[in-house]
């Protein structure tokens, strides 16, 4: 089984977007795929910001429609290179514009010209959502990590399905998602008709493949000059501190 990082992801989607600035079919397709892949973290961020599900869904759609319609990047800095940071900065600017327009409408002053610029990173001093509890950036980043893990999980599942081993994946999946309380490896071996030793090996290989796909997914969201390992370490960190910085 070939490594996903070797066969599927050269150049990375984010590298294509940065290089094309959204002005080529390849750049637009890459940006569209990234936006589709990471729709959920934006939606969760808006829900945490106090919006009901329908309003958050509509606003998420509007945000991504604007990103795609504008080519999404403006003056995005390739040196910053993380799609995660770019997207959160763009979302904060989008929300600031929404807020300004709403306040102008209340004052009867008409529509405020938009100042949205998707080039900013999350540390670029963008204004927090006024009138609500500020959502920590780590909340967005955590759901970003969940989205990466979900995409990696689906990729591994597709591989097992293609190989005609979907039943094996269904039995071994709990060892990827941390839900093994109701299933021992001896029981898994019985279900699969394998020895316990063979199941241990299969679980080890499954986890290794899962890690390879996680790494490949992370590689899509950093520039070619950025460190995948550094991004992985950060995402592991925000997952390990869940609840501590947001309560």
Image (cartoon, rainbow, N blue to C red):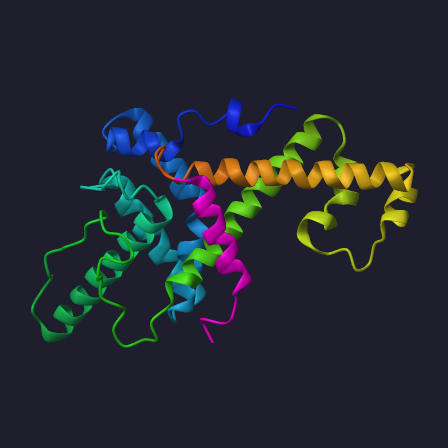
Task: Tell whether position 237 is magenta.
Answer: yes
The residue that appears at 82% across and 58% down in the rendered structure is 182
Q: Which residue is more in the foreground, 208 or 118?
A: 208
Give the prevailing secondary structure in the magenta stretch: helix
The residue that appears at 66% across and 38% down in the rendered structure is 208
Q: Quadrant of the N terminus?
A: top right
Point out residue 232 in the picture as x, y percentages from the top left corner: 49, 47
Residue 65 sits in which quadrant?
top left
Q: Eyeballing the image, is 129 above or below 79?
A: below
Q: Is residue 58 left or right of residue 158?
A: left
Q: Is residue 8 left or right of residue 126?
A: right
Q: Eyeballing the image, is 27 above or below 173?
A: above
Q: Which residue is more in the foreground, 233 or 156?
A: 233
Residue 219 sits in which quadrant?
top left
Q: Eyeballing the image, is 182 above or below 198?
A: below
Point out residue 107 in the picture as x, y percentages from the top left corner: 10, 75
Point out residue 105 in the picture as x, y percentages from the top left corner: 14, 69
Q: Which residue is more in the foreground, 91 or 138?
A: 138
Residue 152 sits in which quadrant?
top right
The stretch in magenta equals: 227-247
């Amino acid at each position: 089984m070939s490594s996903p990082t070797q066969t599927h992801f050269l150049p990375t989607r984010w590298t294509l977007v940065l290089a094309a600035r959204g002005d080529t079919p390849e750049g637009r397709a890459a940006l569209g795929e990234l936006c589709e892949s990471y729709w959920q973290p934006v939606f969760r961020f808006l829900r945490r910001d106090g919006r009901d599900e329908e309003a958050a869904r509509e606003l998420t759609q509007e945000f991504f429609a604007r990103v795609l319609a504008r080519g999404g990047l403006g003056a995005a800095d390739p040196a910053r290179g993380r799609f995660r940071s770019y997207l959160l900065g763009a979302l904060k600017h989008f929300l600031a514009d929404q807020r300004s327009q709403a306040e102008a409408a209340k004052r009867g002053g008409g529509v405020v010209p938009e100042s949205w610029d998707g080039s900013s990173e999350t540390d670029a001093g963008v204004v927090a959502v006024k009138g609500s509890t500020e959502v920590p950036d780590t909340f967005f980043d955590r759901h970003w990590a969940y989205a990466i893990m979900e995409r990696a999980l689906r990729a591994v599942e597709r591989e097992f399905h293609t190989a005609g081993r979907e039943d094996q994946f269904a039995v071994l999946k709990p060892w990827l998602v941390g839900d093994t309380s109701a299933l021992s490896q001896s029981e898994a071996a019985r279900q699969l008709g394998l020895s316990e030793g063979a199941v241990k090996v299969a679980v080890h290989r499954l986890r290794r493949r899962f890690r390879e796909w996680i790494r490949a997914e992370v590689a899509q969201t950093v520039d070619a000059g950025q460190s995948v390992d550094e991004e992985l370490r950060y995402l592991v960190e925000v997952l390990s501190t869940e609840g501590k910085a947001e309560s």
